[in-house]
Image: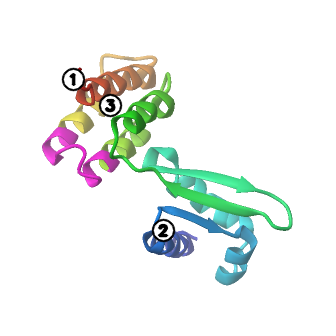
Amino acid sequence: MAGLSNQIERFILQLLKEAEDGVLEIGRNEMAQQFGCAPSQINYVLTTRFSPYKGYTIESRRGGAGYIRIVRVQMDDDETLKNLVQSTIGDQITKDRATHIIQKLVKEKIAQPKEGQLMLQAMEDVALNKVKEDRNRVRADLLRNMLMVYFRTEG
């Protein structure tokens, strides 16, 4: 199934690249027919590979004329970044989700690679080995504080 998921992901990424405004509307059932899979496979790809942690939002409408709208979050203004920090991280965050956020910031050239490496290192379980409980809560606090300081605007 991983091969099919990769194909679906590549297809969606190509369509997003071709979309002028970073917004793509697709039909889940039509896409499932095109790839010869169940609609749940399309849902799986969307929820695992196009999440807010990876810089996307998903909106869907069910029914006969239902669609899925995938929006690439533009990471180029401070307000968007602050909202991402506040809403996406929340009270707890796993190492994988923190890694996705940091990698997205480096990929979008918002953070330099060396800065990203520093942030990633702070998210490692080894760095948090003294914390036996609530490791994801501590990780969320660290990441949120690093990003809020990083994106603090003057004025």
Query: According to the image, label 2 marks what residue?
Result: 16
Query: According to the image, label 3 marks what residue?
Result: 125
Depth check: give the residue in front, 78 or 116: 78
Q: Is residue 86 left or right of residue 69?
A: left
Vertically, is 25 above or below 115?
below
Specify the segment rendered in magenta. Answer: 104-117
- Magenta stretch, main secondary structure class: helix
The quarter holding residue 153 reads top left
Vertically, is 39 above or below 89?
below
Q: What kind of element bears circle 3?
A: loop
- Marks 1 and 3, how far apart in space? 33 Å
Q: What kind of element bears circle 2?
A: helix
Nearer-N-terminus badge (1/2): 2
Nearer-N-terminus badge (2/3): 2
Question: Going 30% across and 46% down the picture, which residue do you hit?
Answer: 105
Q: Amino acid at mark 3?
A: Asp
Residue 19 position, x and y percent, is 48, 70
Q: Amino acid at mark 2?
A: Leu
Which quarter of the figure is the C terminus placed in?
Answer: top left
Residue 77 position, x and y percent, is 34, 41
Circles 1 and 2, Cβ within 8 Å, touching? The answer is no
- Marks 2 and 3, how far apart in space? 34 Å
What label sits on residue 154 in the rendered view?
Answer: 1
Circles 2 and 3, Cβ within 8 Å, touching? The answer is no
Is 123 in the magenta? Answer: no
Q: Is residue 66 left or right of residue 46?
A: right
The nearer-to-camera label among 1 and 2 is: 1
Depth check: give the residue in front, 142 or 95: 142
